[in-house]
Image: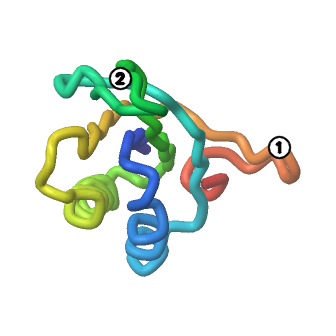
Amino acid sequence: MKKIEAVIKPFKLDEVKDALQEMGLHGMTVVEAKGFGRQRGHTELYRGAEYVVDFLPKLKIEIIVADEMAEEAISVITKTAQTGKIGDGKIFVSTIDDVVRIRTGERGNSAV
């Protein structure tokens, strides 16, 4: 199993969620986050005063998929979250040793 964590722009959530559901994904966790990468934030004007916004609003999506679905999920996220502009986000992939469904005690792929 693989854990896929994708940090994306907030307005892309619905597109990404719908595309993942179309490929057969059963669940996801979404967390509001703030951060920056190479873009290093930006400056904004408020009541005539300029100020720097260091941390930009982002969303972090976490999904667990079977090994054979991982590449498809990564591809779907990449295609749907991409705007072509700086700050589109990142995808992190890691290996999951086990999953336990609390309600039933199921383990492994059947628990996902």
**Looking at the picture, how far across and down is residue 46, in whole percent?**
45, 32
Q: Residues within 10 Å of mark 1 (few under 14, many from 20)?
A: few
Q: Helix, strand, or loop for circle 2?
A: strand
Q: Residues within 10 Å of mark 2 (few under 14, many from 20)?
A: few
Which dot marks residue 50? 2
Task: Give, as a three-letter code, the residue at label 2.
Answer: Glu
Q: Is residue 68 visible?
A: no
Direction from residue 38 to residue 1 in the image, left or right: right
Task: Give, as a three-letter code, the residue at label 1.
Answer: Ile
- Identified at 31% across, 53% down, the residue is 70
Which dot marks residue 102? 1
- Identified at 58% across, 47% down, the residue is 30
- In 3D space, how far apart are the residues under numbered discs 2 and 1 (Cα atoms)? 50 Å
In the displayed structure, 14 sits above or below 56; it is below
In the displayed structure, 65 sits above or below 86; it is below
Q: Quadrant of residue 11?
A: bottom left
- Of labels 2 and 1, earlier in sequence is 2
Q: Is residue 45 visible?
A: yes
